[in-house]
Image: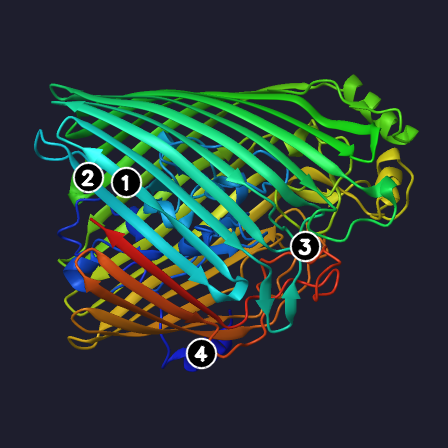
Amino acid sequence: MSPICLQHSCALIALSASLSCLAPTALAQSSQPPLIDVITVSSPQLDNPARDQLDPAAQPIVASPDTTQIIARLPGAAAVSNGALSGQLQYRGLFGTRLAIRINDQAIASGGPNLMDPPLHYAPSVLVDRIEIARGVSPVSNGPGLGGGFDVTLKSGRFADTPQFSLSHDLSLAAHSVDDSTAVGGLVGLANDTIRLHVLGSLETGGDRDTPLGRIGGSAHERGVYGLVAGWQAGPHELTVEGRRNETGPTGNPPFAMDIRFIDTDTGRIAYTGTFDAARLDLSAGWSDVGHAMNNFSLRPAPASPMRWRETFAYAESHTLAASLTIPAMGGELRAGIDRVDTDHDVTITNPMNPNFFLRNLPDIAISRTGGFVEWTGEMIGRWQGELGLRVDHHEARSGLASTGSAVPAMPGMLAMAANNADRDWQASTLDAVARLWRPLTDTARLRLTLARKTRAPGYLERFAWLPTAASGGLADGNTYVGDTGLVPETAWIAEAGLDWANDHAYARPTIFIRRIEDYIQGVPFDSTPGVADTAVEMVAGMNGDTTPLRFANVEAELYGLDADFGYQIDSHWRLDGTISWVRGKRRDIDDNLYRIAPPHVRLGASYDAESWTVTLESLATARQDNVSLANNETETPGQVLLNLYGRWDMRPGVALAVGVENLLDQAWRDHLAGVNRNSGSQIGLGERLPGNGRSIGLRLTVRG
């Protein structure tokens, strides 16, 4: 953002309001490593634990079923809206599998090649208890990944202090006018000082979204989640067993070629923590099983010709094992561990009108990763503290035999034969290293430094997709993609510097960063003559309406920028809080920009806090995004300013009512990270970038006890 543009944006929002999403901890009192933010979320409202020390006011709410919308309010973050339940998180320009996202310490493999069920799909906002964010990069103990780490913890019962059993509950009811949606969820628990049991569940439904430019057809959603958790503790030993069932019903995805018919997912996890003298042992095993169907005729006008009806079935099953030992060492804490992940995928495209039409385009995919790490945290010389980590992973991937039905034209069959004759087995090893350092400069300021080497192995779609389809891992750019078995892992070299400063009246936490990514995986023209159908891949793509298919390839990339949160306590009632985020993504091998990078944006807000209620007026100023990808035919978006109004009333202990009006002026706007519309049964034109919500009223009632 240019200085002129930034000054203009700040002038527009000088009297508006902001998310107080990261009010600072008192630096000298914080027991958390300064590169870890812990955010307690009484979904969908953010509630920073430091708020009790600095400002008891409630946080603004987002009346959305998508937890992505909550995290996206943090500095450096943004939401990639691919549907009501398919949002992905972008952090400092990275999204998808480049971020390490876990739900209850468990990584869940998405069921389909378009990530209609990304990790946060399994964390309904009415069930979220807290979110832990590793700023900048994730620790090596969290596994590989180029970006920050996000650990989402669902609501859970807690052990009591006495042998007598007692009941507890944590329930939420939410509603949103923009899509006539409702959500109810929470838990009921029974516990004493040795045993805890709780059941949790949620049910969410919503219709098509309204915007100032018209209704977005086929954007309704429905999802149900239920689960059971049991825990046991005795002295220094604790055992937890949990299982959940996620049932997503018909849910629209207008940026995609298909919509969700169902996503049925079972997850389970068992975890043990035990302390032996000065050593702590952590063991865990997890499992997830996803069944997913999507089609192009249930929530959008069906193709006129039955020959073009499509329904895709996708499956994913994942098993995880992890063990770590933590001991005192070298004036700090040393943790060493091993982990293993095995994931199987299978995808088949069908025509429900013709049983002889099918394409097993991603058959019997098996992916595994075995890793080990060592991580030390403690005091260093010269008042420095640090976290130093090293990680090694071995990756393996293979694909089964592709096949096509007798009703499929001959050319896709030829592509299947070529894929079967190619090398379908791959293995490689990767090395991650992280040094995160911090040092107090004064009583009110602390310096943060990070140097890291982080890696990501290619996904199964990027490597094994032989059939040109619109599946893109959630890019939703309207392009057709194929994979490349010759891909190598991405390697990011990362440097960050930041400052945490706070006194009795103000705080600021700016960070600057740069990531140079070798072998970054992105779509490039399939061959040197784009638009000329001189290969079988281009001919098949042309049959499906795309004469310029893309191929996933290793390129050279760079991401750099700055973000910050800041605030000022004016008096005992009035305060200002804000965030700023700016990231630039560029190709280093050619003169082009990376695709789908969030534009610079600033949140600024003014809040009035009374004894039992608070009101916040917020504005979000977003700059024009004209640094777009030519290779991906990305279009520019203009700058815009939106106003929101939020309020919260603590009616009595354990009962709170939050309300909000978003897009207060009912302004027409388009989020740069939104995809283009592909549903013809909509008031939004085909190929147009999907607009943002119109004026919407949201409320949430929370009851705890």
Name the residue tied to disc 1.
Answer: 188
- Left or right of residue 17, residue 463 in this image: right
Q: Are marks 1 and 3 in contact (CB under 8 Å)?
A: no
Q: Foreground residue, 401 or 214? A: 214
Q: Foreground residue, 412 or 212? A: 212
Above or below — where is 505 with respect to 540?
below
Chain-order first, disc 4 or disc 2:
4
User: Alpha-carbon distance for marks 1 and 3?
Assistant: 56 Å
Residue 478 visible, this angle = yes
Quadrant housing residue 22: bottom left
Chain-order first, disc 2 or disc 1:
2
Name the residue tied to disc 2.
Answer: 167
User: Which of the two discs, 3 and 4, sits closer to the camera?
Assistant: 4
Chain-order first, disc 1 or disc 3:
1
Give residue 7's mark: 4
**Which residue is outermost to the left?**
162
Residue 43 visible, this angle = no
User: Alpha-carbon distance for marks 3 and 4?
Assistant: 29 Å
> Which residue is pictured at 58% across the width and 71% down the height?
669
Name the residue tied to disc 3.
Answer: 591
Q: Amino acid at mark 2?
A: Leu
Q: Amino acid at mark 4?
A: Gln
Q: Foreground residue, 198 or 522? A: 198
Q: Position of residue 204 (x, y in %)?
A: 47, 50
Give residue 524's mark: none
Q: Position of residue 352 (x, y in %)?
A: 78, 35
User: Which of the two discs, 2 and 3, sits closer to the camera?
Assistant: 2
Q: Secondary structure at mark 2?
A: strand
Local crowd at mark 1 within 10 Å, few (<14), some, or many (≥20)? some
